[in-house]
Image (cartoon, coloured by chain):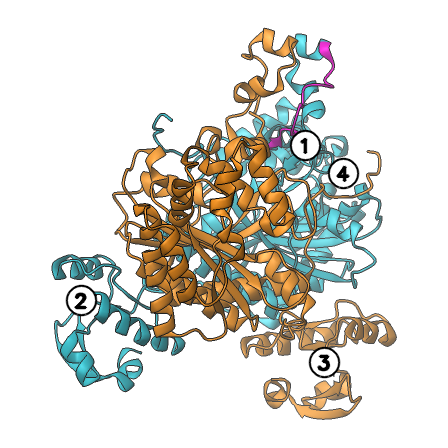
Chain colours: A orange, B cyan
Amino acid sequence: MAIQKPSIPKGTRDFSPLEVNRRQYIINTIKKQFVLFGFSPIETPSFENLSTLTGKYGEEGDRLIFKILNSGDYLAKVDEQLLTDKNSQKVISQISEKALRYDLTVPFARYVVQHQNEITFPFKRFQIQPVWRADRPQKGRFREFFQCDADVVGSDSLLQEVDFVQLYDSVFTELKTPVEIHINNRKILSGLAEVADISAQLIDFTVALDKLDKIGEEAVKEEMRGKGISNSAIEILSPLFSMNGDYKTQFAQLKEILKSSETGLKGIEELEFVFENTTNIGLQSAELVLNLTLARGLDYYTGAIFEVKAKIGEFSSSIGGGGRYDDLTGIFGLKDISGVGISFGLDRTYLVLEENNLFPALEDSTNIQALFINFGTKEAAEAMKLVKQLRQSGINTEVYPDDAKMKKQMGYADKKGIKKVILLGEKEIAEQKATVKDMISGEQTEVAFADLANALS
Amino acid sequence: MAIQKPSIPKGTRDFSPLEVNRRQYIINTIKKQFVLFGFSPIETPSFENLSTLTGKYGEEGDRLIFKILNSGDYLAKVDEQLLTDKNSQKVISQISEKALRYDLTVPFARYVVQHQNEITFPFKRFQIQPVWRADRPQKGRFREFFQCDADVVGSDSLLQEVDFVQLYDSVFTELKTPVEIHINNRKILSGLAEVADISAQLIDFTVALDKLDKIGEEAVKEEMRGKGISNSAIEILSPLFSMNGDYKTQFAQLKEILKSSETGLKGIEELEFVFENTTNIGLQSAELVLNLTLARGLDYYTGAIFEVKAKIGEFSSSIGGGGRYDDLTGIFGLKDISGVGISFGLDRTYLVLEENNLFPALEDSTNIQALFINFGTKEAAEAMKLVKQLRQSGINTEVYPDDAKMKKQMGYADKKGIKKVILLGEKEIAEQKATVKDMISGEQTEVAFADLANALS
């Protein structure tokens, strides 16, 4: 066979031992809090039936779903005219029945409906798995990435929103990362659309508003005008961009604007509940920020929406987000199940911790603590017996596999950052003592076999 | 949109909280030993370039690889004649550039070559990730399943084989599962082919031999005859099927048979080294078994081969396997790197533990330890403050989200197996005491807020 120059697909990554350990540190921190907060883990398949995913993420989303080619003679039954026309779009459903998971929320909705008789509601689940999107790769955005989601379905209590604020606070406090938790409510945005008389254009309005961070106020207004939102409507919406002061001040102003909209006032009431309870309970390090221009892309949100931003470093994209959705399971046949959930972005959180040197010293977390130098077959055989005992005492250890030159073996220990090297020659075996060399100080100590575990731990 | 009846693709699975926790128990046990044995974790992308995988698993393997459809107008550049001919096979490479990982070994070989300058050899890595095969699903065989692999590359020392026997022993001892570790050596099989003068048919010989467990001796011989292996050759190979006694006795017989084959004698020598050292070091619960009919399917093995079988229960398939391969990285341009590795089958190990009731009580490992009954907005707000403190003390707890009827709230606690329920009404708040109800005994105790963490842990 010809030699292939190895590479991996665009937007995917290999993870080295250090990177795996750092990612695992973040995942373990999140998972620990998920459990403390009463969430149980589930896992769903990496690929779903294509029909389960299609139509759930908008037209753009449908394009970004990775489809899996059917096995076997997959072209046999395809409509010949479509092939002749090279109609890529219409051929998809005839040659692909499965697709890679695009997020964890739709598979979760599918899971809830499919397993509704085994589930106790309200159902609190967490799920930490990769998802795939055929997006254009850029900093912090990959074609394969992990999502860490916690959701509750089957309760419309606002205590859930309050608890999710606590959950974000607990996780990012443990990760030593101060964050702002931005919060808004879709009902407020609906109310504003009502009073501006643009309810029919609610989605255009929120889609434009969602870009505020990226393109600025003027461009957002320009986009709204482009979508046919009148200048007078934009005038009515304008206070959105200039409102400030603490949440109470802003709510007072907003109540005045929204006084004619029942939906809008309901949104304010819901947010007030979250703010009051959060103030009452307190936050460890995070800050809850009212952000009336927060819109979030996904259409299915109906109540509170969240987005988390780090307060340190240069990386300004959101590192988490979520919100309440009132009818996600409806499409799969289970009506009137309200849900609310949040997601942690593993890759972006990684970038923030890396940039700000917030990772603990994990370099050694899977490293060998002690290496036995190999002096030959007989000595190595004795070393293997000690290795077995030491591992049973919880010490990561190994024998160098070959009786290579000392320099080579020491070089291996050095490059791998192994802290102790153990010399076990004929003399040491006869005396039942090992010579332990500290790789940093260079100091050598004789340690009786029976004391070795203590000396190394 | 029309309502869809939810389902998942054939051969895939949803995992409930209990199943996730049980799988995690197995994974954590394996991972702990991998680290003690000096292996470091890596992760590779779920999909590789199709060309990286094609041709590495035989013709059958190529068919079973899940291909990912290219994005966008994927048909635009396809050869029109191939479409008209509906030539499914030839069109694949024109509409698919990526494919789901089929195992962890080939991606690992690709990783080693691609990152050879960052790696310290001998390189000991472990990798625990899902793989996908378009196989016919059956008991213990799925289209998405996890592999847990440990490999060493860059050393041909037989101490590695010895250490892998220890690794299997350590993992299955911790899992309380007595196992037989079957071992053979491909060089012995090559030697036998030499003395029977069928070296040109070595692969036919091993492929047939590999089926011995499933189809029996006579059918294996029949298959060999079908492949043109002569009766006189089969006569020479016959002792394979009848050899017994301890490993020393068998080796003595085998040396006689293989005396004219240098390769065969080398294979015996290698196995003797593994047996002698394993006897010297000792095993905790596993048994090392010489199995001269063990062949294993994959072509790339060149030395020792392993297969692990549980000694308990009805499930007789192998729950682990591996072996030495001398040139796996060659295809990617890195020659003369010997490797040896083993794999643990998560799903099959799960079946064995389940069948033999060997899972520890994990039902509660992510469960709520205490539920605060919700008596209304004010009381719940107070409860949330206590919940925050208790979680900081490591107690999994939550407030029931709604002030539903007591019966409903208690029913939730009961169904979820929550052990303690906390009543926090107006009176309790005034007195700064909570009433803790034990859900099993029904006993109620008054506990001061300050003592709550102790009382619950």
Q: Which residues are magenta?
A: B66-80
Counting from the top left corner in percent of width and height, residue A238 is at 51, 49
**Three-letter code, disc 1:** Gly
The amino acid sitting under disc 2 is: Phe
Q: Which residue is mark 3?
A: A419
Question: Do marks 1 and 4 share a chain?
Answer: yes
SS class, disc 2: loop
Which marked residue is nearer to the observer: mark 4 or mark 2? Answer: 2
Residue type pointed to by label 4 = Glu
Check if mark 2's residue and mark 3's residue have beta carbons within 8 Å.
Answer: no
C-alpha separation, residue under disc 2 versus residue under disc 1: 65 Å
Q: Residues within 10 Å of mark 4 (few under 14, many from 20)?
A: many
Q: Position of residue B367 (x, y in %)?
A: 32, 63
Question: Which is more toward the observer, A67 or B92?
Answer: A67
Vertical order, B8 against A385 (above or below)? above
Chief secondary structure of the magenta portion: loop
Q: Which residue position is annotated with label 2? A: B375
Q: CA distance from mark 4 to mark 2?
A: 82 Å
Label 1 – label 3 distance at C-alpha: 44 Å
Marks 1, 3 in one chain: no
Q: Chain of mark 3?
A: A
